[in-house]
Image: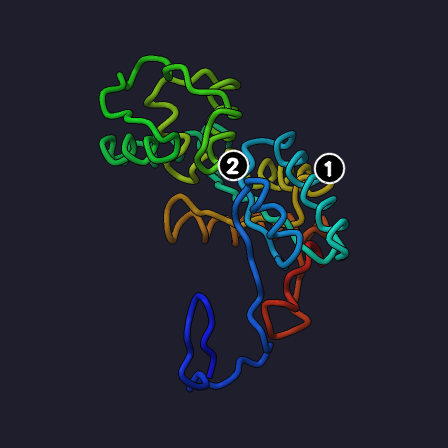
Amino acid sequence: MHEGEYFRVDGRLNVPRSPQGRPVLFQAGASAPGRDLAAKYAEGIYAVAYDLPSAQEYYGDVKARIGRAGRNPEQVLIMPGLVTYIGSTKKAAAAAQAAADGYLPVENSLAQLGRFIQRDCSDWELDQPVPELAPALSFTGPAGRYATILRIVETEKPTVRQLLGRLAAGGGHCTMVGTPEDVADGIEQWFVHGGADGFNLMPPVLPGSLEEFVDRVVPVLQRRGLFRTRYEGSMLREHLQPAA
């Protein structure tokens, strides 16, 4: 029995203990308090990174915080979200992305964008440039997602419609469009150059996008020694390793 400030438990949980003991602890959130929380307790971290430079900034900062917290940075894995559109050619992959964007529910997407930036977007003109957004330092909401949106707007100069499509599949996470080899090249670049220990795969269309990644990209990664060819354990904690 436990009775504390925030919750009360009247007795033991009446389910069996899991084979791995305590659950694997993941954290998500890019604010300074969120990064400190991850540094102290997380075993895996879900991150938002639009491109490699932003991924490297987050990766380096959080790994340093982990070290200052007295933990081994190599034992805490940082995994940005990854959206992929795969085709036999770059043109086919781009067509797959355009087809997915064609299903975009505009009204709902504008509402989602409004939640991300804490602003009413319902009257924004879809085929006009994105209106000026507040600088990151003055934004009081979730910092990571907002910083990603600012980076997309600054880098791509999208229309509102284009921004909605960019955010729809993964909310501004890294998006790779191309052949299986192109996607594997991008993954390898992030892994080798300090942007990620692995990725949180976010298939834009299920089950097709997931099946394409498993059947076409994973074999390329395996040939390059970037993904395991067999599992050596039976539990999630044993599988949290960046490479085979």
Q: Which residue is mark 2?
A: 144
Q: Residue at x 27, y 33 (%)?
A: 111
Nearer-N-terminus badge (2/1)? 2
* 56 on left or right of 83: right
Can you say whether 139 is above or below 17 in the image? above
Question: Quadrant where the C terminus lies?
Answer: bottom right
Q: Residue at x 45, y 53 (%)?
A: 211
Can you say whether 83 is above or below 243 in the image? above
For the residue pair 199 and 211, the one nearer the viewer reads as 199
How far, Cα to Cα, is label 2 from label 1? 21 Å
- Seen from this angle, which residue lies furthest front? 5
* 214 on left or right of 165: right
Q: Residue at x 53, y 19 (%)?
A: 155
Amino acid type shown at disc 1 = His
Image colouring: rainbow
Q: Determine the secondary structure under disc 1.
A: loop
Instruction: Classify residue 170 by image quadrant.
Output: top left
Amino acid type shown at disc 2 = Gly
CB under 8 Å between discs 2 and 1: no
Where residue 214 sits in the image (x, y, percent)?
52, 54
- Neighbor class of circle 1 (other Cα within 10 Å; few <14, some 14-19, many 20+) is few
* 176 on left or right of 96: right
Instruction: Classify residue 106 by image quadrant.
Output: top left
Can you say whether 37 is above or below 121 in the image? below
Where residue 73 sits in the image (x, y, percent)?
74, 52
Q: Residue at x 65, y 29 (%)?
A: 53
Where residue 133 sits in the image (x, y, percent)?
42, 19
Q: Which residue is mark 1?
A: 193
- Neighbor class of circle 2 (other Cα within 10 Å; few <14, some 14-19, many 20+) is some
